[in-house]
Image (cartoon, grey):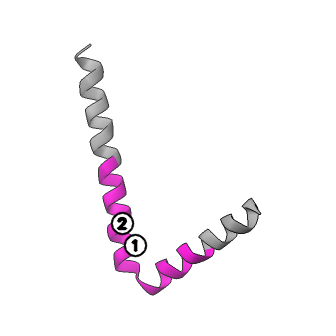
Amino acid sequence: MKKLARWIALAVLAAWLVSDPAAAAHAAHGAIGWLTHAASALSQFASNL
């Protein structure tokens, strides 16, 4: 059942990428920006210890 759910999720993601690449790129950019912000915050926290 988990494999089927994973394949369905990948199929939906692939269909979204093909149907609306600009939105997919925007979402990826936002996720990368969030990761960059989180890494910066963690670095600042560690340097203040």
Query: Which residue is situated farthest in the bottom direction here?
Result: 19
* Magenta span includes 30: yes
For the C terminus, which image quadrant? Answer: top left
| Residue lying at 34% horizontally and 78% vertically, measured from the top left | 22
Q: Which residue corresponds to the image point at 54% horizontal and 82% vertical from the top-left?
A: 15
Q: Quadrant of residue 45?
A: top left
Check the image and report above or below for 34 versus 28.
above
Task: Identify the secondary structure beneath mark 1.
Answer: helix
State whether the magenta stretch is mostly helix, strand or loop: helix
User: Seen from this angle, which residue lies furthest top?
Assistant: 49
Query: Residue 24, how many percent across, how many down?
Result: 40, 73
Q: Is residue 27 left or right of residue 5?
A: left
Residue at the front extreme of this rendering: 1
Percent across and percent down for residue 29 are 33, 61
Q: Which residues are magenta?
A: 11-34
Q: CA distance from mark 1 to mark 2?
A: 5 Å
Residue type marked 1: Ala
Side (left or right) of 4 relative to 18 = right
Q: Is residue 38 left or right of residue 5?
A: left
Q: Position of residue 41 (x, y in %)?
A: 26, 33
In this rendering, the answer to whether 22 lies above or below 40 is below
Which residue does the image show at 31% across and 50% down from the upper left? 34
Q: Percent position (x, y) of residue 17?
A: 48, 78
SS category of the residue bearing label 2: helix
Compared to residue 15, the image places residue 35 above or below, namely above
Q: What is the three-letter code of the residue carrying label 2?
A: Ala
The reply to whether the magenta stretch includes residue 14 is yes
Asked if the residue under mark 2 is in contact with the one under mark 1, i.e. CB atoms within 8 Å, the reply is yes
Would you name the residue on which mark 2 appears?
27
Q: Quadrant of the N terminus?
A: bottom right
Q: Which residue is mark 1?
A: 24
Residue drawn at x 36%, y 56% as measured from the top left: 31
